Amino acid sequence: MRRNQVAVVGAAETTKLGVIPDMSQIQLHADAALNAMADCGLKPSDIDGVATAVESPQQIAHYLGITPSWVDGTSVGGCSFMLHVRHAAAAIEAGLCKTVLITHAESGKSMIGKLPRSIPADSLQGQFEAPYGIYGPPSQFPIPVLRFMKTWGITHEQLAMVAVVQREWAAKNPRATMKDPITVADVLNSRMIAYPFRLLQCCLVTDGGGALIMTSADRAKDFPHKPVYVLGTGESVETPMVSQMESFNSSRAFKVAGPTAFREAGISHSDVDHLMIYDAFAHLPLFGLGDLGFMPYEETGKFIADGNTRPGGKLPLNTNGGGLSYMHSGMYGMYALQESVRQMRGIAPAQVEGAKISVCHGVGGMFAASGTIIFTNEK
Amino acid sequence: MAEPARARPKITPETQHYWDGAKAGELRLQRCDSCAHAYFPPRPFCPKCGSRGVSVFKASGKGTLYSYVINHRPLAPGFTEPHAIAVVELEEGPRMMSNILDCPQTPEALELDMKLEVTFQKIDDNLTLPQFRPAKG
Ligand SMILES: [Zn+2]
């Protein structure tokens, strides 16, 4: 894919985020989609491409009144939307469609109209993991972290600082769910969820959604907002069974998706002004900093603990407060993309002054999948 | 009211030998006849080279503790106390999930790289689950 040929021209989250008991999941999709259409002045009849995850693209297209000529139902967990952006950019560039809507919504807290998710007993995970008591992401996603910490010399205090620093960003964001300052001691004394992770190192459970509208760069300048160009993209999958990852010292899917996007964008790490690393749990930013090649793994804990990613630091990371403090409906990737777009538009609540390049890195299905999108606001 | 039951595997044709082995008190792995790669979970071909020529063999049952969490909540059905969900690195190379039996479920007792050995937990007449415990001696 060539750089800067496709842009995000519409971006919006649901009108409310948090606890939304008066809306079903499909209605949250529609709320986000209509907000994104309003953001760029389009109507359903202007859209000819649809992508979504968990919910089917046929349901979204029908519900919104869209007749697409291109659809993508890639559903690989919370980073599905990074993959949708990548696939949509390729499709637009190839001339398969002109204007793509990507939606996400989840009634993660209120569980209204939420599609069921379970582990089939005859799947490999059902046979070889579920009988040992895995039950939801907290019992699975953190399984690699003790090995990662031992290999790379990461301390519990450094890991706690991930949550502390992200809360500093959340404090600047009126839409963040959790805004009160916290300390390392607060994190390490919060309720135990799955050792070594305590409550404040686990993502929130909320309701909400978001949508993006993408089109070719030559059309993008005719929309109300400054276009946010797709500069580089990457994706990969590894395994839905956390026990079968190649290693716990890194994520193989991260190591493919991230560097692919950097190569495609033709940038180096020092070019990055703003970074989002999907933080369903506190260890993911450490994996991301290492796997994306920002620094050796053994430096990641100290890098965050020393304040380099906090407001005013040299590498602003998870500037909306992240899945730990902003919101997390279950699939967080869309919210990370929204924050990258806001930063590139220059309208983020905690705006990084003069930011020109944003890297948005996602994970899905525990460590099963990964997608990376690099945006820029310069053509 | 009965306690909700632990999640149970539903056996498929390609995994039958593994579960039969567990009932017989054997941890059965597979090895590629072409490239000698030993692997888990069961499948009738080698995930390294794609060969369909593979053999089942009895593993040593020795391993080390690769990583774990101690789950507190939400508790899985059939588990009533904080319990470790561990990944064991087998002597033959593959890794597999397990609980760590006969051991306090604490960070102090569960030391990474500690030596483990297989044990078989009979759930009922139809299911025996391979498990691991600290190695003796
Ligand atoms: Zn082979």
Image (cartoon, rainbow, N blue to C red):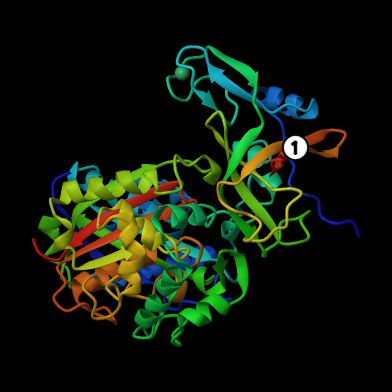
Residue at x 76%, y 49% (from the top left corner) = B102
Residue at x 48%, y 50% (from the top left corner) = A56
How many numbered marks does the figure carry?
1
Q: Quadrant of residue A235?
A: top left
The residue at the far right in this view is B1
Residue at x 89%, y 56% (from the top left corner) = B2
Judge: label 1 CB < 8 Å from ligand 1: no
Query: Where does residue A278 sit, x and y in percent of width and height?
Result: 39, 62
Query: Where does residue A108 sit, x and y in percent of width and height?
Result: 55, 66
Looking at the picture, which amino acid does disc 1 mark? Thr
Q: Quadrant of the N terminus of chain A?
A: top left
Query: Where does residue A112 sit, x and y in percent of width and height?
Result: 60, 67
Residue marked by disc 1: B119
The answer to whether residue B121 of the structure is visible from this angle is yes
Q: Chain of mark 1?
A: B
Q: Quadrant of the C terminus of chain A?
A: bottom left
Query: Where does residue A354 sit, x and y in percent of width and height?
Result: 13, 76
Q: Is residue A228 rendered to the left or right of residue A55?
A: left
Q: Is residue A373 above or below residue A275?
A: above
Front-most of residues B83 and A107? B83
Q: Is residue A33 above or below residue B123?
A: below
The answer to whether residue A101 of the structure is visible from this angle is no
The residue at the far left in this view is A379
